[in-house]
Image: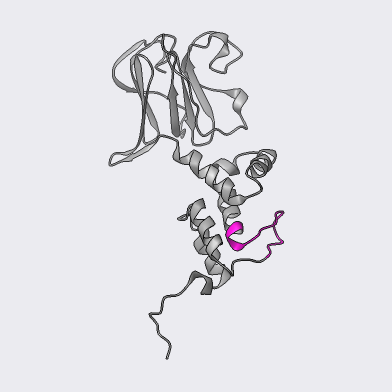
Amino acid sequence: MVDRFRPVSIEELPSHLILEILCSGRLSAIDLACLELTSKTFGGSHGLYPFKFSSLVDFAAFQLCASHIIYSKTSLNSQKELYDRCGANWKRVLRFLQSVEQSSEMVETSAGNMQITTGKYHTLLISNSSVYSCGSGLSGVLGQGPETQCVAFTRISFPPLARVVHVSASFNHAAFVMQSGEVFTCGDNSSSCCGHSDTSRPISRPRLVESLKGVPCKQVKFKLLSE
């Protein structure tokens, strides 16, 4: 008589079911590495793909990387360079991608996802992909057009359907990263420091950085220097 309540090892499951579990997105790169170290039966070839995989876990890590928003939006050359720099190890590539994602500074709250960052005299807030600014600043750093002061959080206008996932502030300019990977900037553009080489005038409302088209970004960091 078969004991229906006998614990079942993952290794006893069919390979297609194991792969489905591994690719569910609920396991981290470290979890995959631990599974591979403790397993004796994970393995097999996957000749339909232009890579060689040492195990089923390695193949699962590759699939998770391929579906990751950061990896999937990079060029083939950049993907190969990242793979090579990670020692041709898909679990390391996945761990790198997950680390970048987790460092976005976005916080889950009961009111939704939020991020707050500050310049010297102003504050920027993301609330569920909408961005608000308050404080004072010259050269359009508030993203509100010619306004140089906002006494309360005021929403910054972006193109329709644009979803902001990361914002960075400095003393006199700001950068906004979209879910699509596009980057918008505003503020003091002297010496083209906002990335707009066609003008040195201040950018008073967020403007797409054309030179970064095709180079998807996750976040932009400014270093705020003290005077």
* Residue 114 location (% of width, % of height): 35, 34
Q: Quadrant of the C terminus?
A: top left
- Please name the residue shown 29% across and 39% down the image: 111
Residue 96 sits in which quadrant?
Answer: top right
Q: Is residue 149 above or below residue 4?
A: above
The magenta region covers 45-58
- Residue farthest to the bottom, as pictured: 1
Which SS type dominates the magenta stretch?
Answer: loop
- Please name the residue shown 57% across and 47% down the image: 92
* Residue 180 location (% of width, % of height): 53, 36
- Please name the residue shown 55% across and 66% down the image: 39
- Residue farthest to the front, as pictured: 37
Q: Is residue 202 above or below residue 163?
A: above
Q: Is residue 166 above or below residue 41?
A: above
| Residue 122 within the segment the image draws in magenta | no
Q: Is residue 13 visible?
A: no
Residue 215 sits in which quadrant?
Answer: top right
Q: Is residue 189 left or right of residue 154?
A: right
* Of 7 and 109, the residue lying toward us: 7
- Please name the residue shown 62% across and 44% down the image: 86
* Residue 98 location (% of width, % of height): 50, 44
Q: Is residue 121 left or right of residue 94?
A: left
Q: Quadrant of the N terminus?
A: bottom left
Q: Is residue 22 above or below residue 194?
A: below
| Residue 52 within the segment the image draws in magenta | yes
* Residue 177 location (% of width, % of height): 49, 30
